[in-house]
Amino acid sequence: MAIEAGQPAPDFTLNDQDNNPVTLSELQGKKVLLYFYPRASTPGCTVQAQGLRDTKAELDAHNVVVLGLSPDTPKKLTNFINKQELNFTLLADEEHEVCEKYGVWQLKKFMGRENMGVVRTSFLIDESGNLEHVFNKFKTKDHHEVVLDYLNSK
């Protein structure tokens, strides 16, 4: 089930890297960049996270809260945050329930093998909790620039 801009963002509660619950609807009043990535500490996911880390001040200027979401455990997320000195929240979706709600848990092909996994996608959620924009065509190293270009064009 693909979700599109203009729809209400599916609400959820997941634990963050410190095992504290985070509920999306409690962030209304701010924009939320909800970005789904396959696995912490892999090369592409690391480059993507570093770009968001390094542009946090610019994202803050647009009133954007960044939430990264993957099927990793909170412990793996803590290690990722500490190693990369990340300055935003990561959420653990170990059962990939939220990934499925957002339509990013899909069959993927890699090196001739097929398996289910996260298709790298980001959703910008507006202050009212609606999907404002879907980012699904970007390179990991350019993700932050694509998001900022969109925000700066508004």
Image (cartoon, rainbow, N blue to C red):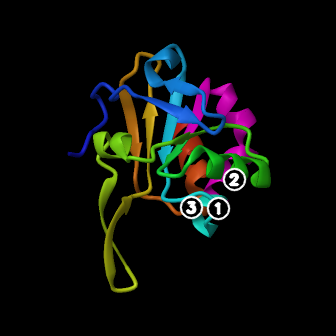
Looking at the picture, which amino acid does disc 3 mark? Thr
Image marks 1 and 2: residues in contact by CB distance under 8 Å:
yes
Residue 59 inside the magenta-drawn segment: yes
Spot occupied by residue 88 in the image (x, y as percentages of width and height) = 67, 37
Which of these two is toward me, 126 or 145? 126
Q: Cα distance, mark 3 to mark 2?
A: 16 Å
Point out the stretch of residues depicted in magenta.
47-67
Quadrant in which the N terminus is drawn: top left
Q: Is residue 100 visible?
A: yes
Looking at the rendered structure, which numbered label has been put on residue 25?
none
Residue at numbered disc 2:
80
Q: Which residue appears at 29% of the width and 59% of the height?
A: 106
Residue 66 relative to residue 120: left or right: right
Image marks 3 and 2: residues in contact by CB distance under 8 Å:
no
Q: Nearer the viewer, mark 1 or mark 3?
A: 1
Residue 119 relative to residue 3: left or right: right
Q: Which type of secondary structure does the marked residue at label 1 adopt? A: loop
Residue 64's quadrant in the figure? top right
Looking at the picture, which amino acid does disc 1 mark? Ser
In this rendering, the answer to whether 61 lies above or below 2 is above
Looking at the picture, which amino acid does disc 2 mark? Phe
Spot occupied by residue 79 in the image (x, y as percentages of width and height) = 71, 52
Residue at numbered disc 1:
41
